Image: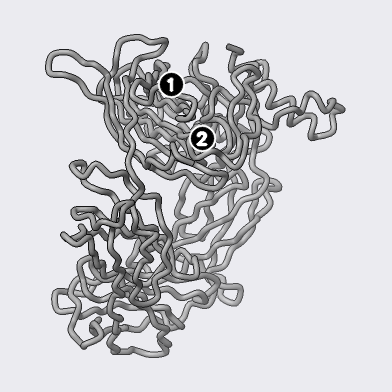
Amino acid sequence: MKSIKNIYLLLILGILCLAGSGCSDASLSSSKPCVDNLDCPLDKECDLDTFQCVDKDLPKPLSVIDLELTPVKGSGNSTTQSTIDLEQVDNTNEINLEVVSAELLVGQITSPDVMGGIPGTLVATRSPDFDNRKLTWNISVNESGDFETELSPGVYDLLFKPSNREGFPQISLTGFEIPAEQSPDLSYHKFDNPEQDPPLVISGRVLEKQTHLEPVANIKVEGITNQGLRTSITEPDAQGYFELRLPFSRYVEPDGDYQDVYPETIDITIRPSNSEVRLPTVTVPGVELIGTELGTFYIGDVPDTVVFSGVIVDKRGRPLPECQLRFTADNIGNGTFSDQIESDSTGNFMTPLPMGTYTVMGVPDLLCEAAIGSEIVELTAALTKNIQLPDRAILSGTVTDDERIPVKDVIVEAKRLSTVSGVDDGVVRTFEVITEADGHFEIPVDMGRYRITMIPSAEGGLPRSLPTVAYVLEDYVMDSSATRLAPPTVIQGHVFGQNGAMPLCGVTIDVFHSDENNAYLIGQTISGSVVEECSGSFAVIIPGNLLSQ
C-alpha cells in the first residue's frame, strides 16, 4: 500500500496546481487522496490501486451496501468501513468482514506559559466518510496535558479545546497521519513574546455607547477567527479594556514539517457574564487583525428592564406546569437578547426583560398534549399576559408487510428536524409509539418537518424501513406506500481481525444503503459468540428488494 505521507503529498500538489504553479492535467487526476472509502465524498469511492477518490457508477445499484464496523473500545481494533455488492457475493450467508487494527495516538499539550501541560479535550476528525458524516473521537487530555487513544489508520484533523478558556484559546492541527513516527505537535507559542510575528495577543475596549463613554460591568468577550477557532474568554477591566489570546492552525507539510497559519479576521462576541445579567449579546463580524489593537466596541442604548409575567396554558385554558419558555428579541441595544425559563408547578411564569419586541416560544414536555407554539409580544411596560399553546397534530398510519398484512409491535419513530419551512428553531425531539395488533399507530406531534422510521421487533423477522419525510401542519395520515415494509432477507457471516486474524465478538455492524445525497441505516446487529468460544458470527436482516432490482 502507498504510504499515507505520499497520499497527503498528492493533496498538497493538487492545491499548488490550483494556485497556478503550472502542473499538468495528469497531476490533477483526483481532487482528493484516500486510504479507504471513509476518506471520499458520498458520490466517490477509493481506488485502492491509486489511493485516490474516483467517481462512482451512479445511480448506485440497490444491491450495493456500505457497512460500518465498530469494535469494542480498547480491544486494539478500530472503526472500519467496507462496501459490498450483494449481487456479486457467491453466498450471502458466508460473508467475512475484517476490522482493521487500531494505532496508538499519544501526545501532550504544552505551553511555555505554564508548568507541565494543559488539560482539555482533543477532538480527532476524519471526514468526509462514505455517507457524508464525520468520524469523530473526543479524547480526554488530563491535568498534565497527556492524552492516549486508539484510532484507525488515516489522515486526521485535530482540534484542542482547553478546559481553561480564560487562559488559552483553541489550537488545531490539520492533515496528521496515523500511524505516525512521532506525536502530533499541538504545543502553544509563548503569548507574551514580543518577537512573535504576528502577535498572539490582541486588545480592545467595550463601552456603553458613543454618547455615554462608560465601561460595562458583568460582560465577557471572546472571538471566533476566520479559521473557525475560538479565542480565550476574558472579562474587561474596570475601564472596559480587555485582552484576547488568539488561536491558530497548524498543518503538516509534505516533508513532515509543520507550518503555522494565523487568523486574518475575527468575529467579536460581547455577551452577559451570566443569565442574570439583562444585557444584549453584541456580535461584530469580520474585524480585521491588523496590529494588536481592535478598537472600541459599544453595547448600545439598552432600554429599561420591566417584568413580564403570566400563565402558560393549553388550548382549553389549562395551565401547563414546568413548560419551557424562550424569549428572543433582535434589536436590544446593538445586539440581541434571549432568556429561557420554566413555568412553575401551577403554570405561572415571571421574568425581567429589557423593553422591546419579543418572540415568545413555549416548548411543553414531550408527553404533554399541547404543542410547541409562539407569538409576538410588544413589551413597552410591565406586562401580565397568558401564553396559549395549540394542540398537537396526530400523525397516523398503518404498518403492513410487503403483502399488505398489518404488522404489530413495530416502533414508529418520528424525529422532528425543523419547522415546516425548514428553519432550525432549536427544538429537535423524537416521538415514538408501537403499532397495535392491526398495525395502526397514532402519534401526537408538534408542527414541523419529520423523519419517520419504522423498526419492527426482532421476533417479527422484518427489516426496518427507509426514512420517510413528512411535513406536519395538521393531522397527517401517512400513505400506505410509506408504511409498507419491504420483504426481508438475511445476510450473515463472521467478523475477523485484520488479515483474517482471530474472530471478533461485540463488534457493532451498521448496514447502510446510500445514494449521492443520503445514507440510510437499513440494518444493525452485533457480532456474537457461543458460550465458551467467540465465533465472530453475525446475522442481520435487511430489505430483500436490494437483491431483486
Q: Secondary structure at mark 1?
A: loop
Residue at which label 1 appears: 90
Say left or right for 322 vs 372: left
Q: Position of residue 88 (x, y in %)?
A: 49, 25
Please tell me which residue lies in front, 126 or 519: 519
- Residue depicted at x 28% and y 63%: 398
Q: Is residue 92 above or below residue 512?
A: above
Say whether disc 2 or disc 1 marks the residue closer to the N-terminus. Answer: 1
Q: Is residue 308 above or below residue 395?
A: below
Question: Is residue 406 at all visible to an observer of this figure?
Answer: yes
Q: Quadrant of residue 294?
A: bottom right
Give the mark count. 2
Q: Position of residue 367 (x, y in %)?
A: 20, 67
Please tell me which residue lies in front, 212 or 543: 543
As measured in the structure, the alpha-carbon distance from the residue carrying label 2 to the one carrying label 1 is 27 Å
For badge 1, the amino acid type reads Asp
Image quarter in which the N terminus is found: top right
For badge 2, the amino acid type reads Asp
Is the residue marked by circle 2 packed among few (<14), some (14-19), or many (20+) residues within 10 Å? some
Please tell me which residue lies in front, 35 or 463: 463
Q: Residue furthest front?
A: 403
Q: Position of residue 165 (x, y in %)?
A: 42, 43
- Residue depicted at x 23% and y 53%: 410
Please tell me which residue lies in front, 490 or 232: 490
Residue at which label 2 appears: 129
- Residue depicted at x 64% and y 42%: 263
